[in-house]
Structure formats: structure tokens, C-alpha cells
Image: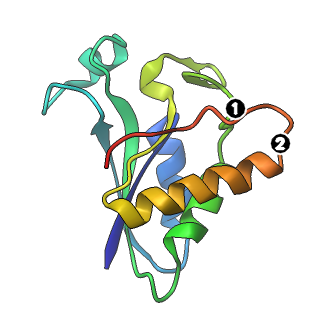
Amino acid sequence: MQEAIFAGGCFWCTEAVFNDIAGVASVESGYIGGANPNPTYREVCSGTTGHAEAIKIEFDPEVVSYADLLDIFFATHDPTQLNRQGNDVGTQYRSAIFPLDDAQKTEAEAGIERAAADRSEPIVTTIEGP
């Protein structure tokens, strides 16, 4: 099993999408990207902690690849909206990928390029981490 971490707005919305993907064993919602290791919901909602609402996906790469998960991620949120998704506004709702190693970072860069090819507006998704 491998893990992937994506932030694409409200974590409950993105969690629901990935729970139905073959090869995904589990999806866990949480916060990532800020300084406080255990922020509260209220702290994150203040927009001052640097955290993003994110999901951690545990998946079987023999069934679904990291690249496939990236393509699903880009297809199920608007990666052209800076620090928002629809009515959810703030840095905690940013579009971001948190690669866990260099291979995932390379895949994330390729995923952004694939997503950009299908859109007229620029992709604002960030890659945060290694």
C-alpha cells in the first residue's frame, strides 16, 4: 500500500470522491501544511495557521496508480481557483498536492501539466513538500 495527500477545498467533499475508487483502501480527512501539529477546526478556519483541509489516501498501486489519483483529483475540483473552492474561501481551501517523496513530486508536476492542457485558465495548485 502507498499513500497520497491532496488538498482540494472542503475535505469532506474530496473524501467522498476517493472513497468510491477501486484500489483505494481508506481516505482520512485532516489538516496539513501549517506550523501547529494539532490545530483545531476553529484555528484552521481562521485562515491564520497555514494549514489546508486535506485527505490522506491509502491505495494499492497495483489497482490504481498515483497518476490516476492525480487525474481524479484535478477532475473533481477547480484547480484554477486561488485559495477557494466555490463558496469556501481562504487559504485552508487551497488546491495543493503534498508529495511524500521525489517520485510523487515528479508525478505531481506531470499531473499539473496534464490538467493545464484541458483548461484555459492557469492551474494554481501548489506542490508543497519534498
Residue under the point 56% across and 53% down: 109
Does residue 8 lie above or below 39 as drawn?
A: below
Q: Amino acid at mark 2?
A: Arg
Q: Are marks 2 and 1 in contact (CB under 8 Å)?
A: yes
- Please state if 122 lies on the left or on the right of 64 as rendered: right
Does residue 60 lie above or below 54 as drawn?
A: below
Question: What percent of the width, then of the height, locates residue 29?
Answer: 34, 47
In the picture as drawn, the residue positioned furthest to the left comes out as 37
SS class, disc 1:
loop
Where on the picture, by quarter, is residue 87? top right
Question: What percent of the width, then of the height, locates residue 44?
Answer: 30, 20
Where on the picture, by quarter, is residue 104? bottom left
Q: How many marks?
A: 2
Residue under the point 48% across and 64% down: 19
- Please state if 99 lies on the left or on the right of 81 as rendered: left
Q: Is residue 57 visible?
A: no
Residue under the point 52% across and 34% down: 9
Q: Is residue 37 visible?
A: yes
Where on the picture, by quarter, is residue 128? top left
Comparing 91 with 40, the one in front is: 91
Q: Amino acid at mark 1?
A: Thr
Comparing 111 with 60, the one in front is: 111
- In the rendered view of the protein, which quadrant contains the N terminus? bottom left
Query: Neighbour class for label 1 at 10 Å: few (<14), some, many (≥20)?
Result: some
SS class, disc 2:
loop
Q: Which residue is mark 1?
A: 80
Mark with earlier residue (2, 1): 1
Q: Which residue is mark 2?
A: 119
Question: What percent of the width, then of the height, locates residue 12?
Answer: 46, 43
- Cα separation between marks 2 and 1: 9 Å
Say which mark, if any, is on residue 101. none
